[in-house]
Image (tube, rainbow, N blue to C red):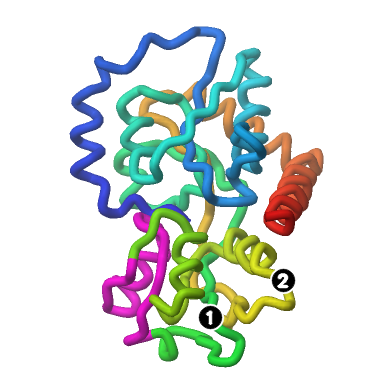
Amino acid sequence: MKAFSRLLPCLLVAAAFVGCAPKQDPNTIRMITEATFPPYEFREGTAVVGIDVDICQAIADKLGKKLAVEDVEFDSVLPSLIAGKAELAAAGITVNEDRKKTVDFSDPYVTTGIVIISAKDSPVKGKEDAQGKAIGVQNGTTSADYCVNELGQEPDRFDSPAAAFAALKAGKVSLVIADVDPAKNIIVQDGGDASAFAITSEPYFLTSEDYAIAIAKGQPELLATINEVIGELKASGRLDEIFAANKAKSDALATAE
């Protein structure tokens, strides 16, 4: 999902302020995220919950620490991590080579991809159909990168996939490109099968992407612990349970809204 491809200047500025980060409680590990990406992170009342939160809670439990979750603007997630304001960044972050230059990544915990949402009566099925149309995306994501790099055009950028979809319903854009899980959640919230919109891309994924936990560079022991936890969650079946529980919860919240 989340590309951060345009953030290098911000990352460099953030790195200059590491010494200004608040003093860390040794009994707490901090996670930084952006909570508009269900089922990976979303709000249940005032609490930030989701797949990424549950994985980071398991990491905190392994370390014998409390987990503190901070919700920030999407473009601030990696700069805040690099600036020392958190130990873990988990926000449906896609692993790529550019990002590996500035942060270290855990083993992936899911492989996913981006899809097209469009009107059922005028479906946009792929790259050829999408080119030249007004496209809504969440700013800073791999969906935005796809528009620029693969379609050769600048998309309309929004703060969240839901905001991009609102523009689609209002006729301000012709389609939305987003990660599959928030895209599914959007359709559920819009009425499910009764919605006039659907995921229409064929083949289903326009890209294949791995999500992982990001940490500041130079922490091999923390990285080893994170990878150990991810391995244990996969082997025990607990990771599948985390995905299923949060998918059900985010779908229920979407239906109720």
Gap in angstroms between the C-alphas marked 2 and 1? 14 Å
Label 2 Cα crowd, 10 Å radius (few <14 / some 14-19 / many 20+): some
Label 1 Cα crowd, 10 Å radius (few <14 / some 14-19 / many 20+): many
**Which of the labelled discs sits on residue 192, or is there none?**
2
In the rendered image, residue 128, in percent from the top left (x then y), is placed at 41, 90
Q: Which residue is mark 1?
A: 118
Inspect the image, locate mark 1, and give the three-letter code of the amino acid beneath it: Ser
Inspect the image, locate mark 2, and give the three-letter code of the amino acid beneath it: Gly
The magenta stretch spans which residues? 131-156
- Whether residue 155 is in magenta: the answer is yes
Q: Is residue 104 above or below residue 190?
A: above
Mark 2 and mark 1 lie on one chain; the one further toward the N terminus is 1
**Which of the labelled discs sits on residue 75, or is there none?**
none
Q: Is residue 199 above or below residue 133?
A: above
Q: Is residue 114 above or below residue 37?
A: below
In the rendered image, residue 47, in percent from the top left (x then y), is placed at 62, 32
Element under disc 1:
strand
Q: Residue at x 72, y 52 (%)?
A: 247
